[in-house]
Image: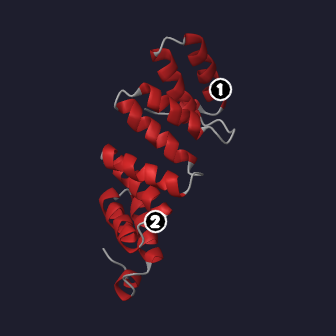
Amino acid sequence: MPTKATRLAPRFILAHYDLGVAYYHRGNMREAEGAFRRCLDIDSNYNAAHYRLALALFHQGMLEEALTHFERAMLLTPEYLMAHYHMGVIHERRGELDLAEREFEKSLDDGIDEASSLYHLALIRRQKGDTKGADELLRRAREFGAAKVTR
């Protein structure tokens, strides 16, 4: 549903972006996707739109296209550390454990432990037979509220 701002100024990128964010937070991923795509029609290098589009696609299960937009967002703005987390989840679901492990590790690059990344890293390490390493990661994850993590 277009807003008054998007109807009056269809090339005003922030109106489309804000509309997409609103749809996203309401759980309407299909509409959010459309709004973020309109942003990219206006400016194909709008990094925030690539990232938010990737999230909307991710939540719709469109993982291949989500991965493409996460990668594009990372090229434009390497500071999107949570993009690494989502890319890790996609690779993990595809059984690409080495790629997933690398992405989860990158999501921790700022030195701040993030429970979800630590939890997924622990699962991968356990699958690879590194029980000691997995246990240490789970200990760290618990310190940061891993009880809230759902898979």
**Depth order, front residue of 4/37:** 37
The residue at which mark 1 appears reads as: 140
Q: Residue at x 44, y 69 (%)?
A: 17
Camera-side residue of 67 and 3: 67
Image quarter hosting the C terminus = top left
Disc 1 residue type?
Arg
Q: Residue at x 39, y 86 (%)?
A: 9
**Element type where label 1 sits in the image:** helix
Residue at 57 percent across and 33 percent down: it is 105
Residue type pointed to by label 2: Asn
- Residue 49: x and y, percent? 44, 63
Q: Secondary structure at mark 2?
A: loop
Q: Position of residue 72 (x, y in %)?
A: 44, 54
Q: Is mark 1 in CB contact (under 8 Å) with mark 2?
A: no
Q: Which residue is mark 2?
A: 45
**Label whose residue precedes the other's in the sequence (1 or 2):** 2
Q: Is residue 10 visible?
A: yes
